[in-house]
Amino acid sequence: MKILQINASYKPAYLYGGPTMSVAKLSEQLVSTGNGVTVFTTTANGKDELDIQSNKSTLVDGVSVTYFKRVTKDHSHLSPGLLINLWQNVRGFDVVHIHAWWNLVSVFSAFIALTRKVPVVISPRGTLSDYSFQNKNSFIKILIHNFLGKKILKHSYLHATSVAEKKALLNIVKPAGIFNLANFVKIAKSLPNKQSAGPVLKLLFLSRIEEKKGLDILLHALPRLNVPYHLTIAGDGDENYISILKNIAHYNHSENNISWIGFQNENKFDVFSEHDLLVLPSYNENFGNVVIESLSAGTPVLISEHVGLADYIIEHNLGWICQTTPQSVSDVINTIAANSMHELEAISMNAPSIIHRDFDDSQLIKKYINMYQQIIDHGGV
């Protein structure tokens, strides 16, 4: 099976967060099971470019990756070189898997592959939802969707990463088919030295710092807490937006209870283990890789009802669910501190084994291979 993975970013562009890492791990798992995998991506690394040779196949952890230069430095990621190469070579692949939407790499790549009669599966990864239509460049998104996107998506297969995302996608488009498979997530190989909860509740926010992650909600909730706490914020983002968030912390007099430690990668499981509760009050989240990472390290979670994994958390009693309001977040945290500290300890003990059982790489890759085979057998649309 020859599979072409297309994403506007690829490691080591770690600043793009979970989706980039999930695409990389999927590609690596496919290679490890004997499949032919090629990745087309760009040199995108935020406003900068990766210091890597472009237009030449490079082995990255066993995966053949070609990085193409882009001519726009924003999230449109226009890369003529990638699109030209795709037009010339796409028929050499059995299926094309495109990740994310609303960028020119994804939209034009899907159009080219379908035009060249190669089956396409698209993983929107949270970029195709009611929230995405309403947030940032909404008028342009509606135009693209009505004049081009809707037709492309109709003839493509879609990959959702949660039941919630699948429902959201089917409310927007009617694709050729849809699959629901969890993300590949790097989880803790062994349980770090988990610290017991002390007199100060140690809260953690670990994610890309952007509007949809709901960090503003958490910051507004802090003055409502009636227990001693300390919040660690781990992640990078737009400097102007971070300044706004720091001003919120200053004006609500919580800045002395907050540590901003920046982006964490290799040591993030140690960071999880040092905290009592991960808080992710996102306005919209198709899956939530960080939720699985945190639980694999034995750290319970508090997530909003709009995180794709909310039903999973409820089903397995791995944390708490809140609404996207400061009052709801503070109410849950106060309740945990007053009545549920024993539940924190129970989740810390039970979560790692549950996560290792449900997110086993060897079982998940079989499901992805089966998805590709079904699409190839059907022959596309």
Image (cartoon, grey):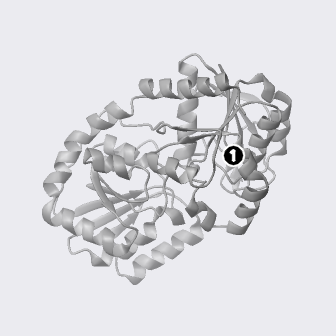
Q: Position of residue 304 (x, y in %)?
A: 38, 61
Q: Position of residue 237 (x, y in %)?
A: 55, 61
Vertical placement of 135 versus 317: above or below?
A: below
Q: Position of residue 38 (x, y in %)?
A: 68, 27
- The structure residue drawn at horizontal position 32% and vertical position 68%, both measured from the top left corner, is 329
- The structure residue drawn at horizontal position 18% and vertical position 55%, both measured from the top left corner, is 197
- From the viewer's side, name the closer residue of 70 and 212: 212
**Is the N terminus in the top left, top right, bottom left or bottom right quadrant?**
top right
Vertical placement of 365 versus 166: above or below?
A: above
- From the viewer's side, name the closer residue of 267 and 329: 329
- From the viewer's side, name the closer residue of 292 and 162: 162
Q: How many marks?
A: 1
* Camera sees residue 138: yes
**Is the C terminus in the top left, top right, bottom left or bottom right quadrant?**
top right
- The structure residue drawn at horizontal position 51% and vertical position 56%, both measured from the top left corner, is 208
- The structure residue drawn at horizontal position 49% and vertical position 23%, both measured from the top left corner, is 366
Residue most extreme to the bottom: 251
The three-letter amino acid code for the residue at tag 1 is Leu
Q: Which residue was labeled with disc 1?
A: 153
Q: Position of residue 95 (x, y in %)?
A: 69, 28
Local packing at callout 1 (Cα closer than 10 Å; few below 14, some 14-19, many 20+) is: many
Corner quadrant of residue 6: top right
Corner quadrant of residue 156: top right
* Camera sees residue 288: no
Vertical placement of 163 versus 306: above or below?
A: above
Please give left or right for residue 369 compared with residue 218 in the image: right
Vertical placement of 305 versus 268: above or below?
A: below
SS under mark 1: helix
Please give left or right for residue 81 compared with residue 327 in the image: right
